[in-house]
Image: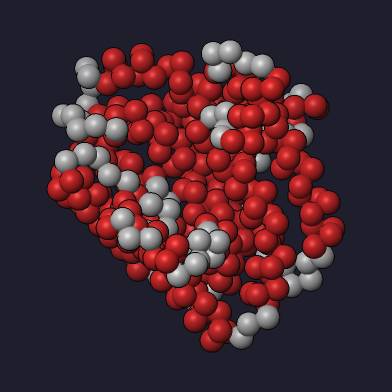
Amino acid sequence: MSTVAGRSYDIDLARTLSCFLVVMTHVTAYWNYKFQPVWEVVNFYNSLSRCAVPIFIMISGILLVKKDIDPATFYKKKFPKAIAALLAWSAFYYIFYDNNPTITGFFIKILTGQAMYHLWYLYFLLGMYLITPIISLAYFGMSDKQRLFFFITIIVLFQFNVIKSLTGLSLQSKFNMDSIVTLSWYMFVGKYVYDLKDKIRSKIVLSVMFISSIAFTAIMNEWYSHYIGSPSQAFLDNFALNTFIAACSLLLLSTKVNFTYLNKISHKISGYTFAIYCIHPAILIPLKQTVWELSWGNSMTYFLPLVCVFMFIISLCISYILKSIPVIRYVC
């Protein structure tokens, strides 16, 4: 476990890394939608970044899945802020990015769609919070063998979504399991994996697992995309086994880092990650044309990660300002 002065910093590091990778996912999206000379490089960075959302959810599992959870108390604590954040950020993006914003249109938008592509996660949080007590009850009601069995079952269920992406065959619908195959199960996975962190000690093994899963993702996604004639998301899926392995191994690697300076920095950034997630598209969208034009005069191998770092730092600075404003702080 990474600790400084008796404090555990592994969750802070994992959260900071996953937040940066989310930014990378959205930056790469601007080059990833069609084949072009830089597509292979973009595909690699896109593949590298796709474990971000699962890690976010796994962290929620580590922090929220508790043996003595009281549903009523939990809901009172989580839902007001989650709903306020959804409404506030939806209003922000709707007002500034909709061609003809109206009050009626706003409520239609939040009920039938979303004001900006990344806000799906804020809707997801409401559903995740709703079933957190159920996941807690399931987790602590199982023996170690039962948890392992259920862990494997989750992996199998997740692959139904990948099969659908590759073949069009919807096994979850056919067997009436649409409501069961949900990203929320990553909470169970996160709690289970984190509880085993002291038993899985080899940094080398974890590093090999992470690198191998990313390499597999990039290679298979490139092959399959060229096979079908257009960029594919099949192997980039949050449910895919390669994404699952990358997320678990990177989360565990975060528990093995013992660099004092890095841990302290990630601890400071960690408190701003939700705000960074919410605000970064507002920075990325206005700059995308400029970034696109600059990319052709530079090597994407280093240019793309530099853009990601720039976007992350700017988002962090704005998040710092937002969180210093009392009213706005509540939804950040």
Observer able to see residue 179:
yes
**Count of marks placed on residues:** 0
Q: Residue at x 54, y 44 (%)?
A: 16
Q: State left or right for residue 170 relative to residue 68.
A: left
Position of residue 58 relative to residue 330, above or below, is: below
Query: As displayed, is residue 105 above or below residue 147?
Result: above
Residue 304 in percent (x, y) is at 32, 30
Observer-nearest residue: 281 or 300? 281
Question: Where is residue 78 drawn, in percent x and y?
Answer: 76, 49
Q: Is there any visible trace of residue 222 in the rendered image?
A: no
Please name the residue shown 84% across and 58% down the image.
73
Percent coordinates x, y for residue 88 in the rendering: 70, 29
Colouring used for the render: secondary structure
Is residue 324 rendered to the left or right of residue 210?
A: right
The quarter in which the N terminus is drawn is: bottom right
Q: Residue at x 70, y 73 (%)?
A: 137
* Residue drawn where x is 69% and y is 68% of the image: 134
Q: Is residue 239 left or right of residue 62?
A: left
Q: Where, by quadrant of the figure, is residue 5 drawn? A: bottom right
- Judging depth in this view, the residue of 61 and 161 nearest the camera is 161
Classify the position of the C terminus by image quarter. top right
Q: Position of residue 99 (x, y in %)?
A: 54, 13
